[in-house]
Every structure is written in C-alpha cells, then in structure tokens.
Amino acid sequence: MTTSIYKTCVLLSFLAMLASCKKSGPVAVNYDPTKQLTIKNVAYGSDPAQAMDVYLPAGRTAASTKIMLMVHGGSWESGDKADFDSAVMAIYPQLAGYAIFNINYRLALNGKNTYPAAVEDIGTAISYINSRMADYNVSTQKIVMAGASAGAHLAMLQGFGKNTDGHIKAVVDLFGPVDLYWLYFNEPFPQLADPVLKNFMGTDAVKDSALYAQASPINYITAAAPPTIIFHGTADAIVPFNESERLHAKLDTYGVPNSFVVYDQEGHGWAGAKLTDTYTKIVNFLNQYVH
C-alpha cells in the first residue's frame, strides 16, 4: 500500500468514526413513571453551582407524588448536596410517594453571591422542577422544604416568606438560624459568628438592620405558615438553642402546628440512634400533615 493510499484510508476511517459519534448524541433519559429513577447533577440554572440530584420513586404521578427539597448547610459559604447523600439514602425508602430534590446553590465567597443569591436559587430550583413536571411526574403543589443549619435557614425563608401560593405544605428545620439580627448581637462566639454573617449578608447588622430583618425567617411567621418540625441540640455552640426555642414559641403564638424535638447535650448535629430517631420523626410528621 502506498503512503498516499494509507493516509487516505486513515482519514476516511477517522471521518466515519466522527460521523458515528455525532449521530449517537447524548443518551436520552427514560422517564418511565413506573420505574424508580435517580439523576445526578441536573442543572436548574446557568451557574455551575445551580445543580441538583433528583430521586424519583416508582409509580409517581403528577397528581399525587409529593416533593421534598433538601438544602445543605455550611454557613452559606461551604458545603455540598453530597453532605445529604446519607440522609437521602436513609429517608427516601421511608417516604412513600415522595420525590427528593437535593440541591446545591451559589455560595457566598469573597464578596460574591451575598444575600439574596442563595435564597433566589431556592425559588429558581422550584420553578425549574415545575417546568419539568411532564417529565418528572411530581406535584409542585405539595412541597416540603427541608434543610440543616444554613440550609434550614434558606428552607424556612422559602417556607415562611415565599409561600404565596400555599404549595409548601411543611418545613423541616434542623438547627437553623431564624433571626439573623438577634444572632449578630447575641451569638456566644461573635468573633467567629459575625464574620460568617457579614460574609453571607454582604454587610453587618449595625449598618443595615433592615436587611438582616428581611433575611430572618422568624419575621415571616403568620397563622398561614406551614406545619414545621424543629430539631436542635441543647449544647449547640454554632446556632444557639435559643433560636429554635424562639421559633417554636412564635409558631405556637400563631397556632401553627409544630413539633420541637430537643436532643439533650447534643451539639450542631448528631449521629447514631438519635439520627435514626430524627428520620423517623420527620417521616411521621410529614405523614400526619402532608396529604
């Protein structure tokens, strides 16, 4: 075989392979509602941080399959949806009739993505889910907001302050801050907490008390707030136990159904039997109030 013929054969082979790759394209997702489906890293916005993991149960329908939207913690500046992977695996089999959307959001770092960027991302994620109802076969009229720490703050802001259509039916709060203005001046370790709050808010509470009040879930509680289950350890040194006490008291004042689960001497999170108890109590609470 001459050199020119050999080169021609190689070129033709390469072009044939390239054409074959173009024809195949991305693999289509089979959204068969009779089958359980997990889709990782679904983009719900243009920013790389705006991504979610989607867990769809078998037998889902747009009329009856409820949604749990999970929001990770990390002081609004760190953390990842993967932090909730073990929680999803533990609670998903117990939540019959629920799809879970475990989301990332833009983190506040170096003056970027300050409040309300992360709050806006929660709304954007819900809007995206709503736009994919035909594929997902879930009901965006039956939403549970759940979060831990900073993620619980974001979940509560959505549930208490952004629930104008009444589609958020319950809130799960794992030791989340509820009053950022109060926290700024009363945190037991202000040298650690105040920089975190300023990083998230883009300013301090002295310069802009109104903004801190706007970003505080406790200020949005009315009689129309959704049923809420609260979890907190009495030895929490990051988000004071008093935050959840005040939330519980205000929910009671407005007659909002709520459950306040206290773990004596536990800090900012727990494990073992108490964590199993947390999952059980969440499932029981949602079975009672979300239909």
Image: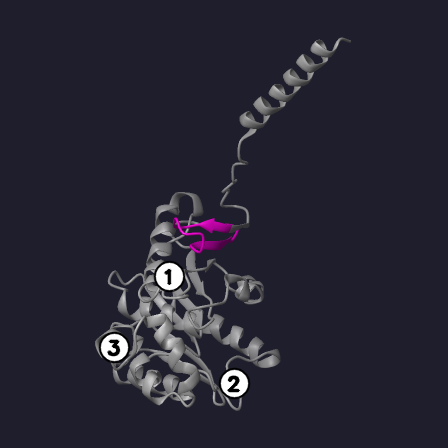
Three-letter amino acid code of the residue under disc 1: Ile
58 w.r.t. 166: above or below: above
Q: Residue placed at 27% from the left, 63% from the top?
A: 166
Q: Which numbered mark, 3 or 2, is in the foreground of this view?
A: 3
Mark 1 secondary-structure assignment = strand
Label 1 and label 2: CA atoms lie apart by 29 Å
* Quarter of the rendering containing residue 114: bottom left
191 w.r.t. 12: above or below: below
Q: Residue placed at 32% from the left, 60% from the top?
A: 120
Where does label 2 land, which residue?
267
Where does label 3 land, which residue?
213
Crowding at mark 3 (Cα within 10 Å: few <14, some 14-19, many 20+): some
Q: Is residue 165 left or right of residue 74?
A: left
Crowding at mark 2 (Cα within 10 Å: few <14, some 14-19, many 20+): some
Q: Which numbered mark, 1 or 2, is in the foreground of this view?
A: 2
Q: Are marks 3 and 2 in contact (CB under 8 Å)?
A: no
Three-letter amino acid code of the residue under disc 3: Ala
Label 3 and label 2: CA atoms lie apart by 26 Å
Tag shown at residue 143: 1
